Amino acid sequence: MGGVPAPEAIAGTYVPNEILRRYYRSAAWALNDHWADMRDLGFVSNRVFDVLASGGRLLTDEVEGLDEITRTVLPERGVARFRTAEDLDAVLAEEGDAWYDETSLRALSDHVRKEHSFGARARVLLEDVLAHRATANVGAPRPS
């Protein structure tokens, strides 16, 4: 791997959230990696959802739970991922279209926006809390 990009390769250090999706969508690859504790505990990075919802070509490190998010749309290979620097180099050597065509990008975008939006995730959390409350007898008088 090449290490740190040359200064002339860096166009800036900040992109406003309102237009970030345009960058994700137009990039050859949108690179993502997880903090070690997130990866170890199976917390999928928000960037995964942002890139996929934008229709971008995601390249990410392995994290538990990623297959459950993407395999219904990409049942064979899933999203482009790496475990080692060599894996990363190998994927980067391929064309992004080897992993994603326009049909799969659209399907992933539709799936993530429908099933993994903030509203969809909040509904799941609320349903889980309500189910727990129903079985835990929350609010019932406590024995004295």
Image: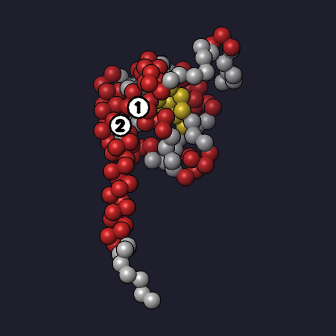
Mark 2 crowd level (few <14, some 14–19, many ≥20, 10 Å Cα): many
Q: Is residue 24 in view from this perspective?
A: no
Q: Which of 82 and 47 is in front in this view?
A: 47
Residue 45 horizontal/vertical position (percent): 51, 40
Real-space Cα separation, disc 2 to disc 1, in angstroms: 7 Å
Q: Determine which quarter of the picture holds residue 84.
A: top right
123 or 27, which lies in front? 123
Q: Name the spot of residue 129 as percent of width and height, x first.
A: 37, 61
Examine the rendering and report whether any part of residue 125 can be seen. Answer: yes
Where, quadrant-wise, is the C terminus in this rendering? bottom left
The number of numbered discs placed on residues in the rendered structure image is 2
Query: Where residue 109 sits in the image (x, y, percent)?
Result: 34, 31
Residue shown at the point (63%, 13%) measured from the top left? 9
Q: Can you say whether 134 is above or below 4 in the image?
A: below
Residue kind at label 1, given as amino acid type: Leu
What residue sits 33% from the left and 45% below the top?
A: 120
Image-quadrant location for residue 110: top left
Name the quarter where the N terminus is drawn: top right
Residue type indicated by callout 2: Val
Indicate the secondary structure of the residue bearing disc 2: helix
Q: Which residue is drawn at 61% across and 49% down?
A: 37
Mark 2 and mark 1 in contact? Answer it, CB < 8 Å: yes
Residue to which mark 1 is pinned? 52
Q: Name the residue under label 2.
A: 112
